[in-house]
Amino acid sequence: MPNEKKKINVLLVEDDTFLANIYKTKFEMEGFSVTLSEDGDIAMNDIKKKKPDVVLLDILLPKKDGFTVLKELKESKQFAHIPVILLTNLGQRDDVEKGLALGAADYLIKAHFKPSETVNKVKEILHI
């Protein structure tokens, strides 16, 4: 049996199911394993259970927004090392600065990045 590399596990937190599936398909075509969470509460549970290698996090989410999820994640000794890329349509400078100040590895505005470019950004951040 060939020596298979462990798949990189991406947690995608996105409440738009259509969009989430587009990203999921693109990442899976590139050999990633993807878990989808549709709100901030589910995202925190999935992070604890699945321990993803990277989190793609929308900001405008039901129940708990992305900034809150990011803050909780970065305050947790167990999960603070997981890189978080904010993937959102909020493009205001204040939002970008807040996200980066809270510890996001990067801030991508959905309208400016194709899913393939988002995959490349994840590879860049994970050095793969």
Image (cartoon, grey):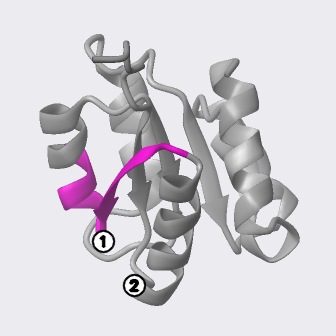
Kindly indicate whether the residue at mark 2 contacts the one at mark 1 (C-beta within 8 angstroms): yes
Q: State the SS at label 1.
A: loop
Q: Is residue 57 left or right of residue 126?
A: left
**What quarter of the picture does the N terminus occupy?**
top left
* Residue placed under numbered mark 1 in the picture: 38
Q: Amino acid at mark 2?
A: Thr
Residue 40 pos. (x, y %): 30, 60
Direction bottom: furthest residue: 18
- The residue segment tinted magenta is 31-44
- The residue wearing badge 2 is 17
Q: Amino acid at mark 1?
A: Glu
Report the residue at 75% width, 41% height from top. 121
Vertical placement of 84 versus 83: above or below?
Answer: below
Q: Residues within 10 Å of mark 2 (few under 14, many from 20)?
A: few
Q: Is residue 71 magenta?
A: no
Q: Point out residue 28 in the picture as x, y percentages from the top left corner.
A: 48, 55
For the point 42% across and 19% down, the residue is 5
Viewer-closest of 82 and 36: 36
Give residue 62's quadrant in the image: bottom left
Q: Can residue 95 be seen in the rendering of this structure?
A: no
Would you place residue 48 above or below residue 19 in this image?
above
Magenta residue check for 41: yes
Where does the image place residue 46, in percent across and percent down from the top left?
Answer: 19, 46
Residue 23, relative to residue 16: is it above or below? above
On residue 80, the disc is: none
Decide if residue 69 is in sight here. yes
